[in-house]
Amino acid sequence: MTILDKSISAAVMIIAVAAIRSLVLYKLPRTTFVALWGIVMIHLFNPFSFTSRFSVYAGVDLLKQAVAGAGADGTAPLSPSGDHAAQAIVRLTGIETQAASVSVFQVIWLSGVLIFGVLFITLYLKCRRKFATSLPVADDAAAFWLKEYPARRSVDIRQSDKIISPLTYGIFRPVVLLPKAMDWSNEAQLRHILAHEFAHIRRFDALTKLLLAFTLAVYWFNPLVWLMVVLAGRDIELSCDEAVVKGLDAPAKTAYAMTLIGMEEKKSALTLLFNNFSKHSIEERIVSVMKMKKTTVMGMTAALALIIAVPAVFAAEAAVAPDQDAESAIVLSVTDKVTGVTSISEDDGVTWMEESEYLKTHPAADIVWWTADEYQKWLDQEKIELQSLADAPGWSQDKIDNAVRMYEENLQYIKAGGKLSRTVNGDDSIVYSDGTLAGEE
């Protein structure tokens, strides 16, 4: 898959997850959606693919076949054997045009990656320099918390007059940074804040936020990736809220909700790169806290089913039957006019390999080429068969004339010395050519 293919398929997943989230956000464990966003990120960078018979793209393929069968853009050419299966044709075109079109996108895309990458790194380093001026917290309640809830990693609690809400940063040596102006006498509030921030630390959310920023830098051109980053940030906060309030009674939940309200802040650029205690989605968090109930077996089962179903339906490619796959196989071959190196592609030009590498796993094909006389004889019969389809659904005289015209141009191509395969390893459903065929520019 190209970066655009990944972006489009991930966009479908993001829409699906966002839609599911809007329906069942308060009915499932909040970590469910953090996991789903993680699956989307994995899909965006996973170079491998898998198939599923439940894939949504199976329906898309069926729709494409239906449209092709209806002849919406001219019916697929008939194969030399006379059946009506579409042929896959190997076209030997110059590599310059494709390379030029790809390079334009690559320049634009990489420029965006560079701009956003530099922007995020600059923001991160600027914040870290600002955080470096913080001071240790000399508070008995904070010190007691560290002793009561020891972490596997060394955690430092500090204070700063340059922030207005608590946040956590650092992966290997995490730091909980608290506003110097907060009410240190409110011990209950302090415990709520520390519990929330320690939940971030235990879950390595600082790393997750950096991965989200990296994903955004790479897929900056996809607005749905921006939506994913926003929603994923919210779900990370909701998940930590869940970790804090699970098992609490109603009054304790209310107290935690009041802490959220008390620590509400204006929108901050830090949200993307660090774990802020407060969020602009404060209302969503408060509703989530107050509606939060003990996770049931049914809820866990539904969450697990959702985590399995979403990639199976929206990330997987459509499973193709062996015979269908054979009919639609496309192998492209191009020769660089400058270097003389021949490259082969088995996935419609997405990836390429040198001919020598291709031949190691694909022995030279047994190709039978058409002669002009044989093709003329076949074409005469094909014209009769095509004309018999004039009144068939999806056909018209114009489409028949266009098909005949293409075949006649192929005949002239053969007469001029061009090569067009009749069979490849005994199979007439794949056609090889050593030049530009009719219908190509």
Image (tube, rainbow, N blue to C red):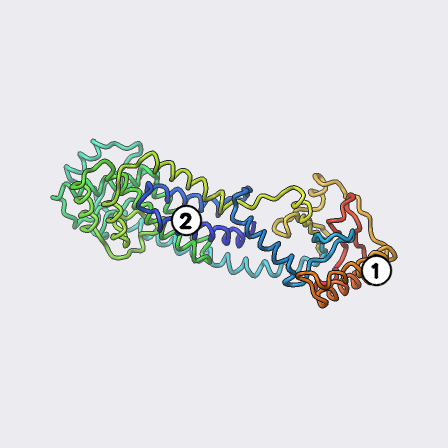
- Bin the neighbour count of mark 2 within 10 Å (Cα to Cα): few under 14, some 14-19, many 20 and up: many
For the residue pair 351 and 232, the one nearer the viewer reads as 232
Asked whether, in this view, residue 214 is left or right of residue 67, the answer is left
User: Which residue does the numbered mark 1 point to in the structure image?
Assistant: 380
Q: Amino acid at mark 2?
A: Val
Picture layout, residue 295 above or below residue 96: above
Counting residues from the N terminus, which is met first, the one under dot 1 or under dot 2? Answer: 2
Question: Which x, y percent locates residue 398?
Answer: 71, 68
Viewed as shown, does residue 23 lie left or right of 392?
Answer: left
Q: Residue lying at the far left in this picture: please name it.
A: 185
- The location of residue 341, given as percent across then percent down, is 71, 51
Image side of residue 370 versus residue 10, left or right: right
The mark lying in front, picked from 1 and 2, is: 1
Q: Residue furthest bottom?
A: 398
List the single residue furthest toward the front.
391
The foreground one among 103 and 388 is 388
Q: Position of residue 417 (x, y in %)?
A: 84, 58
Quadrant of the image containing the C terminus: bottom right
Circles 1 and 2, Cβ within 8 Å, touching? The answer is no
Q: Residue at x 35, y 36 (%)?
A: 298
Q: Please state which amino acid type lies under the numbered disc 1.
A: Asp
Position of residue 9 measured from the top left corner of the image (x, y, whole percent):
50, 51
Which image quadrant is residue 66 in? bottom right
Instruction: State the SS at label 1.
Output: helix
**Residue beneath disc 2:** 17
Q: How many marks?
A: 2
From mark 1 to mark 2, how far is it between C-alphas? 55 Å
